[in-house]
Amino acid sequence: MTAGSAAAIGRRPAENERRPPGGGRRRRGARRLALNGAGLLVALFAAFPVYWMITTSLKPSGEIFASTPRPLPTEPTLAHYRQILTGNLIPGVTFTDFFLNSALVAVATVLLSGLVALLAATAVARFRFKLRTSFLIMLLVVQMIPLEALVIPLFLMIQRLGLYNTLPSLILTYLGFSLPFAVWMLRGFVAAVPKELEEAAAIDGASRAQIFRRILFPLVAPGLVATSIFSFITAWNELIFALTFINRQDRYTLPVAMTFFFGRDDTAWGPVMAASTLFTLPVIVFFLLVQRRMVSGLVAGAVKG
Amino acid sequence: MTTLTEVPEAAAARETPARRRRRVDRLPYLLLLPCLVVIGVLLLWPLGQVVVMSFHRLDNVRQLRGDREWPWVGLGNYAQILGDPFFWTVLRNTVLFAAANVALTMILGTLVGLLLNRLGRRMAAFVASCVMLAWATPALTGTIVWKWIFDDTSGLVTWAFNALPDGLSQALFGRSDWTGYGWFNSPLLFFAILTLVVVWHSFPFVAVSVLAGLKSVPSELHEAARVDGAGPWRVFWRVTVPLLRPVFGILVVLSTIWDFKVFTQYYVLAGGTQDRPTFMLSVYSYAEAFSPPPKYGLGSAIAVILTLILLVVTGVYVRMVLRQEEDA
């Protein structure tokens, strides 16, 4: 039988259950070694920049600019962090100010987008109505709108609304960006709550509002947390719109402040890496909490057992 | 609230008893309302507005605030752009960059996904965690670190090239002292580094998705093929690839969309939007609109062209997802 029919055979796997012939133990050992070696290379490539960011931030300036770089700081120091956190990044504005601007924008985005998304996800997951499919298709399509193409018209809108140079301009913008994915993701969490629970509550005389508050909401809460983290990361990381809508230094978000901060010719890499680390760590922690759902959200339904 | 359009299957559905009992329920529409308002105002309206703006000559921020007239120029902005050889350079940059990045991301991501599937449990967990780090790192700080790695005085790459034996370095590259070498100065090298940064950011998603796909394929299939004498190469092309085709399809489309509009990484590496030889469509549009003198109309026209290109790609994506939703 040729290998070409392997896929066809696959449909009846039970008939072909047989142990593969035992290969030489040494050959298998060599293969394992090669695989592990490749694994280490991949791990190195993937993690190195993060490693390098953190170690650089802990090196004294002398070591950073030494002619021979060292893998680890010989005399680790928090001086760069101290400089970042106590000094002024831009005259009159501290790192903490930018951090708070970013946090305010991100948290507001998360709360608004979580609330709106939960309502919409409930509608989609719990009701059959005529425009349901159209709505779902629209959700998919709007996620594909290149946001970079919306900078100019949103700039116009922000100007018209008098929101130029204000943080709400960014909250509004990020709400729009994060909402479609949030609804798409929450939909699955709402659908996973057994409908029988709600029906039982309804029979016991609970109103729709009570069912939503007492039954659906607590059960969907973990999903809401996961969804919120994605909205948070979207808002926290965003650069272009923050760059365009805010032209007052004390209202910069952290990403904008950082592009100014290291844009100079003789970049002080120590403080830059310290700032980068402080900016990156919350994202990494949040991300690792929810990355599984990211895959299932983006390639929803593509993989089936 | 009644629906405006008659969905074909609705006529048939109306006959079922459940439908008759429920009548038209307003609640789902009420729940959807805030979401529809947000999407309408913050995504769809701007999308229409950018088209309107592309038909006008807008070169003053007062026009945006509504204090001044918007002179209609019809297709003038488009004619100006399409007639400019520079646009075609930008388009070529964009397409070549996206193609190279999608290809490299897919290849590397797939290989890593296959590797993760073969590694022992502990090793796989270790490698996967490292891969996650690259994925989780924000585009902004990830790019800043790469810029530090390629720094022209104390960067790691500069150091590594300096560490090469002088004779070898001279023979290969025609120079032995790399201190002060501008890694970002030649467009080709700039694009190579940008590719490195973007692939580094995007291969983890492909790897993890491919791994998820592989895990869902029953291992009996591979064993059966192997028993039949198929080598690893044939097993991959004849069993794995056909089973993962839907995953690959979606990954290619998503990567294409993302790589067509890379901005943050570009902005950080290029240090702004002034380096015209390395422009890509998203950067070009932004620079036309916001670098003084502002040309919002022209920038909008470029944004529309970018959107149209991506619309085609999106159409393919939506059709694929819908087909899978139907199957599910």
Image (cartoon, rainbow, N blue to C red):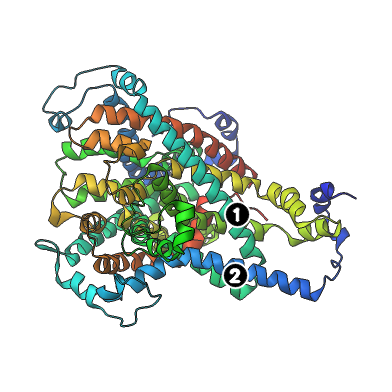
**Disc 1: host chain:** B
Sequence-first disc among 1 and 2:
1
Question: Residue A225: where, in percent of width, then height?
Answer: 40, 63
Q: Nearer the viewer, residue B16 or A177?
A: A177
Q: Amino acid at mark 2?
A: Ala
Q: Nearer the viewer, residue B45 or B188?
A: B188
Q: Residue at x 83, y 54 (%)?
A: A12
Is residue A305 shown above or below B280? below
Instruction: Measure the alpha-carbon separation of dots 1 and 2.
Output: 15 Å
Tell whether B139 sits left or right of B130. left
Question: Residue B258: where, in percent of width, then height?
Answer: 44, 45
In the picture, residue A161 is in which quadrant?
Answer: top left
Numbered circle sitting on residue A299: none
In the picture, residue B161 is in which quadrant?
Answer: bottom left
Is residue A62 shown above or below B58? below
Tell whether A32 sits left or right of B204. right
In this view, which residue lies farthest toward the bottom?
A75
**Disc 2: host chain:** B
- Report whether mark 1 lies on the same chain as mark 2: yes
The answer to whether residue A212 is visible is: yes
Question: Residue B248: where, in percent of width, then height?
Answer: 60, 47
Residue to which mark 1 is pinned: B110
Element type where label 2 sits in the image: helix
Is residue A79 shown above or below A47? below
Q: Residue at x 55, y 66 (%)?
A: A41
Q: Residue at x 60, y 31 (%)?
A: B12
Q: Amino acid at mark 1?
A: Thr
Element type where label 1 sits in the image: helix
Residue to which mark 2 is pinned: B124
